[in-house]
Image: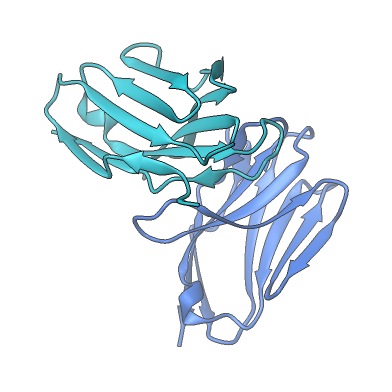
């Protein structure tokens, strides 16, 4: 079991560029979560999929951020026109069932927007 | 406002002592409480968790205490070791969305 896989581990973009972050949940897990971690805000919930369907994106900034889960083996978080304040560690987690609370985290993608 | 609070940003404990990490919450609907450990540059790892129908759970050197009336839960680490040095995050959940505390940096001094 490789655990949750996130790629890339590090990404540096220029202001205004697009960044796409990838997450591969643990095989067989039906729930996928995206979080953002900054020093100032700590860990923040962004969005959540259950059986590939978006359930709650209340944590997502309404502009420029979007997330998809085209199949059960991966999810993407896309940030358009990146801004320096988007710099953070983006964490993906998966859990076996949507109401099973043990979430297994990936290593995160450290995004730096210059 | 913050629904889950860790009021101590840092804690230093002598090796061999008991580390006590505290977390307060606001939402009566929370029914799951967890402690995660985060090393620098690593994602959080679940240490121990408890449902709201119990007030204590032990696992080796770790014990979670839940005080529902006080809306408070804590993590006790006995026989603290230098390798316990890390940031500890508490989290609570009422459905599927974990709400996180800001973390407490625990430093174990040899």
Q: Is residue A103 left or right of A39 when viewed as pictured?
A: right
Count of picture labels: 0
Q: Residue at x 31, y 21 (%)?
A: A78
Name, please, the residue furthest toward the right. B53
Chain B colour in the picture: blue
Who is closer to the viewer here, B79 or A8?
Answer: A8
Who is closer to the viewer here, A14 or B105?
Answer: A14
Q: Is residue A17 left or right of B48 when viewed as pictured?
A: left
On the question of residue A60 being in view, the answer is no
Q: Residue at x 20, y 21 (%)?
A: A18
On the question of residue A9 being in view, the answer is yes
- Locate residue B64: give its quadrant: bottom right
Who is closer to the viewer here, A62 or A3?
Answer: A3
Chain given the colour cyan: A
Q: Position of residue B104 (x, y in %)?
A: 51, 58
Q: Is residue A108 above or below residue A78?
A: below
């Amino acid at each position: 079991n490789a655990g949750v896989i996130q790629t890339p581990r590090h990404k540096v973009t220029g202001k205004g560029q697009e960044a796409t972050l990838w997450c591969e949940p643990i095989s067989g897990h039906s729930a996928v979560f995206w979080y953002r971690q900054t020093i100032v805000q700590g860990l923040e919930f962004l969005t959540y999929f259950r059986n590939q369907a978006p359930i709650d994106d209340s944590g997502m900034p309404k502009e420029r951020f979007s997330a998809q889960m085209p199949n059960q083996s991966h999810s993407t978080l896309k940030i358009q026109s990146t801004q320096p304040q988007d710099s953070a560690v983006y964490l993906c987690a998966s859990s076996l069932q949507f109401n099973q609370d043990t979430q297994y985290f990936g290593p995160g993608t450290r995004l730096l927007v210059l | 406002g913050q629904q889950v609070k860790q009021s101590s940003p840092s804690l230093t404990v002598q090796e061999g002592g008991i580390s006590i990490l505290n977390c307060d919450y606001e939402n009566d609907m929370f029914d799951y409480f967890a402690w995660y450990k985060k090393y620098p540059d690593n994602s959080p790892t679940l240490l121990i968790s408890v449902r709201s129908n119990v007030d204590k759970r032990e696992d080796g050197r770790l014990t979670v205490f839940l005080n529902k009336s006080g809306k408070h839960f804590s993590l006790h680490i006995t026989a603290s070791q230098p390798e316990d040095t890390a940031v500890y995050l508490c989290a609570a959940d009422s459905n599927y969305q974990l709400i996180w505390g800001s973390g407490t940096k625990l430093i174990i001094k040899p």
